Image: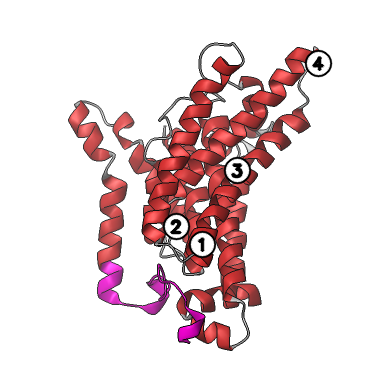
Amino acid sequence: MFAIIINKAIVQGIPLLFGSTGEIITEKSGNLNLGIPGIMYVGGSAGVLGAYLYERSCALSGTAPVGFWCILIPLLSSLLGSALLALIYSFLTITLRANQNVTGLALTTFGVGFGDFFGGSLTKIFGEGGNLNVKTTADYFKVTLPFADDLGAFGTIFFSYGFLVYVAIAIALISAYILKKTRIGLHLRAVGENPATADAAGISVSKYKYAATIIGGAIAGLGGLYFIMDYTGGSWTNGGFGDRGWLAIALVIFALWKPNIGILGSIIFGGLYIASVYIQGLGNASKEMIKTLPYLVTIVVLIITSMRNKKENQPPQSLGLHYFREER
């Protein structure tokens, strides 16, 4: 039973890990992107859209879908869709210096609307009924390691997942290493802490902000793709993503802007999110209250870190602020 609960917590937490890792990279550059929920939504909808068009083309031509393309097409579609939305955010906030909070919230609204329109209407455009469903593609994403069942509880906890779970963990660990141990990470953190000083040192502030925001958005979009392909089995449901995008932003605070801590945090958040399923005798109101636990835990962590006031546990100093080179 314990192994199953941990397994479900990890499955539930992986979309949050993708989203939080992407947002941490973005925020390290000084950009506060509240459009992450919309970007994750677009990442999922773009991926399922690419998979649907590929499966449909195979059906029309009378050929069977090839596993390589079933994985590559939705993966690239998700990355491109979410990166494009992040590029729009970057252009508006970095080049045009629009308000970051307003822009992010607008992108979230747009992303949800985009996903619901194409996910719920595209099949009707082609004369079909119902929402998008790409079960054939999803089956490839859900393939687990063949020896997982032979290892009992150990296999259930560590090896019984699709490849995107391991990709999420690898990206978080690599991101943590780059941010802390490399010159690129040092420059990025300098841009987020004090862009004027970074600019004076010859670091291109705009380039780092653009790169971090776009790469972070692309990574976050994979959270939406994972949710659709692995968690729901390739079936699109309008609004099915729920509040996971906002939980990913809350996880950034819980992880203290450190992607490696985000791995543990995502498992904790995933466990708290599904805790009501395993607690017997709860009414609907109590179940909904339990779902708020990740947010309450985040508030507690925020209060504690604010009281301790350690610099390494604080957000970048210029987070959410525009940089005007003329004022340097």
Q: Which mark is residue 185?
A: none
Answer with mark 1 or mark 2, whichever residue precedes in sequence.
1
Q: Which mark is residue 26?
A: 1
For the point 25% across and 27% down, which residue is it? Answer: 280
Answer with mark 3 or mark 4, whichever residue precedes in sequence.
4
Question: Which secondary structure, mark 3?
Answer: helix
Please state which amino acid type lies under the numbered disc 1. Answer: Thr
Label pair 3/1, CB-CB below 8 angstroms: no
Q: Which of the 4 quarters of the picture holds residue 161?
A: top right
The residue lying toward the viewer, choosing from 318 and 227, is 318
* Residue matched to label 3: 81
* Residue matched to label 4: 63
Q: Between marks 1 and 2, how big is the CA–CA gap?
A: 7 Å
Q: Between marks 4 and 1, how big is the CA–CA gap?
A: 42 Å
Question: Which secondary structure, mark 1?
Answer: helix
Neighbour tally class for label 4: few under 14, some 14-19, many 20 plus, Cα within 10 Å: few
Answer with mark 2 or mark 3, whichever residue precedes in sequence.
2
Q: Which residues are magenta?
A: 304-328
Q: Between marks 2 and 4, how big is the CA–CA gap?
A: 42 Å
Label pair 1/2, CB-CB below 8 angstroms: yes
Please state which amino acid type lies under the numbered disc 2. Answer: Asn
For the point 56% across and 83% down, which residue is it? Answer: 199
Neighbour tally class for label 1: few under 14, some 14-19, many 20 plus, Cα within 10 Å: many
Tell me if 278 is positioned left or right of 164 in this view.
left
